[in-house]
Image (cartoon, rainbow, N blue to C red):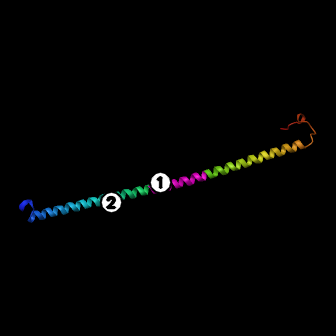
Amino acid sequence: MGPGGILTGSARQFQVAHEKAAAVLGQEEVEGKQREWDRKREALENRVAAMRRQFELEEQEAKLVISQKKHRDELIREERDRLVASRQSSERKEAAAPQSRSRKSRKVRT
């Protein structure tokens, strides 16, 4: 050691080498942490992408089920309307037709 606590000679070389090693280790630690976060980010993005794909599949299935239900409901509504119109037409025809027999005298065949 030189005057005033300044390192000289081999002690100085040792100190410089030690500081370089510490700097390299620190840089490697930073790079390692960065790689770790990059891997975690990529894994997260993959999970999010998989969740989006799953959601889209479920959404398509739900839309199909909803569409089928609406179509089925429309068919039922159309059939009901057709039956109502048919009954009303039959009732009008019966009302317009001359009554040759009373309803009480009709016999029902089974």
Q: Where does the image place residue 32, in percent across and percent down from the top left?
A: 29, 59
- Tell whether label 1 touches label 2 (CB within 8 Å): no
Query: What is the C-alpha distance between the residues marked 2 and 1?
Result: 24 Å
Q: Which residue is at the front of the view, 90 or 14? A: 14
Q: How many tags in the picture?
A: 2
Q: Residues within 10 Å of mark 1 (few under 14, many from 20)?
A: few
- For label 1, the residue is 51
Q: Amino acid at mark 2?
A: Arg
Q: Position of residue 51 (x, y in %)?
A: 47, 54
Q: Tell which of 68 and 26 is nearer to you.
A: 26
Q: Residue at x 60, y 51 (%)?
A: 65
Amino acid identity at mark 1: Met
Describe residue 57's horizontal placement relative to residue 5 as left or right: right
Q: Which residues are magenta?
A: 48-65
Disc 2 target residue: 35
Disc 1 on helix, strand or loop? helix
Residue 53 location, x and y as percent?
Answer: 50, 56
Predominant secondary structure, magenta span: helix
The disc, 2 or 1, on the residue closer to the chain's N-terminal end is 2
Q: Label 2: how many residues lie within 10 Å, few (<14), some (14-19) or many (20+)?
A: few
